[in-house]
Amino acid sequence: MKDDILKRFVRYAEITTTSDRSKDVTPSTDCQWDLLRLLESELRELGVNDIDLNEHGYLIARLEANTERDVPVIGFMAHVDTSSDVSGTNVKPRIHENYNGELITLENGIVINPAEDADLGRYRGHTIITSDGTTLLGADDKAGLAEIMTAVKYFTDNPEIEHGLIEIIFTPDEETGTGMDKFPREKLKSVFCYTLDGGEEGEVDSECFNAYGVKVEFTGRVIHLGSARGELANAVTMASAFVSMLPQNESPEATDERLGYYCPLEMKAELGYAELELFLRDFDMDEINRRIEAVKVFAAAVEARFPGGKVNVIPVKQYLNMKEHMQKVPEGMDYLLKAAEKAGVKTKFEIIRGGTDGARLAEMGIPTPNIFTGGHNFHSCKEWAVLSTMEKSCMTIINIVKLWANPDVS
């Protein structure tokens, strides 16, 4: 199983699938189709015939039930895209077998130091996978893809093992926050689903941020600079003034655990018009609403400071905290915890300071917690994954399926 997971993961990681949040099409980049079509082909090779890959890059496949038991339909989900925060082009995975516990030195002066990364220090003697240091690795979420595909192979290779109908769901554009905007919810039969998009061994996520994106538009008043006194409203300066009003103690770099934040993500500006993309995050919806109101106050203050200029605030919901949905089908979480235990994993509940496609799917009526994949330091050139944890994640998937088919299985 380890060999299969590793080969799949390396194969998937080498394919460029960087998404682009500036595009309003789904998938946002053509390169994501390369991996989606490969996954479709591999599923067919495994004997999965019920496959739907639609025009928006949503791949939904079904492994048919092989039992007459009345087993609820469940799903497993992962995303094909990687973050644009760091280059994901020409990824060259490096495999460090029997890791010696010392510094891992990569190209571009990148060093992964176990003295600074306590998680790494625990895996002396294990197989560690990194990039070459010039790109991210892509364990977010190609580790999840490899684990789900290897679990599918397990069941097709062992048809005597009873299971119900299993849905396999691969999505584009998770990293842009728009990956579920066009998702064909009506095609799913699952009563419960699991995303394979978590991090370190044992991490189980059933709570995430509430997330809003805010587009802030600044319209200036333009006149020749030589005659600008008392007339010019410079949109570049307006946008800069707005950003300076955002509380620094409520920024991503100043918060952790359950503290939310404002994050100015991207700005395009010229004299007459500027546009700012702003992220708002919090676990408490009241705090999100407070931040939205604060943004409107900051906008009014900028208008007052720059006569003739206008500021328009457009908040858009991205995803909501999935916590409230988990208890709708309580056995789904129970089986997850038992399945991980059977795989030799001690679970721990974590909050996601971010979101997953599972949070969006939970809003659509299918509770979807998030399971560890074995990846660490996502969205960076120091990203790494541990193969033994990837195997345990795959075994957790297999055990979940068995428990849904027969809750008394030993």
Image (spheres, rainbow, N blue to C red):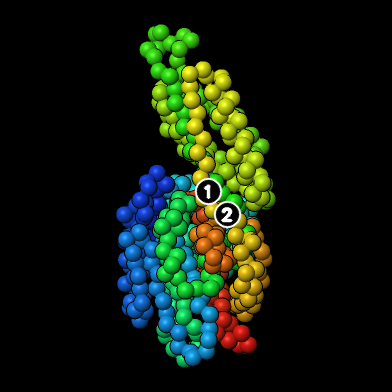
C-alpha gap between disc 2 and disc 1: 8 Å
Residue extending farthest to the front is 186
Residue pointed to by mark 1: 317
**Quadrant location of the C terminus in the rendered image:** bottom right
Question: Is 114 located above or below residue 293 in the figure?
Answer: below
- At horizontal 52% and vertical 59% (from top left) the residue drawn is 360
> Badge 2 local density, few (<14 within 10 Å), some, or many (20+)?
many
In the rendered structure, find residue 320 and report the number of the disc placed on it. 2
Foreground residue, 225 or 325?
325
Secondary structure type for disc 1: strand
Percent x, y of residue 136:
45, 53
Label 1: few (<14), some (14–19) or many (≥20) C-alpha neighbours in 10 Å: few
Give, as a three-letter code, the residue at label 2. Answer: Leu
Whether tag 2 and tag 1 are in contact, CB under 8 A, the answer is: yes
**Whether residue 282 can be seen here:** yes
Image coordinates for residue 181, horizontal then vertical, percent: 44, 55
Task: Answer whether residue 137 is visible to the viewer in this image.
Answer: no
Task: Pinpoint residue 12: horizontal percent, then vertical percent.
Answer: 39, 64
Kind of residue at disc 1: Lys
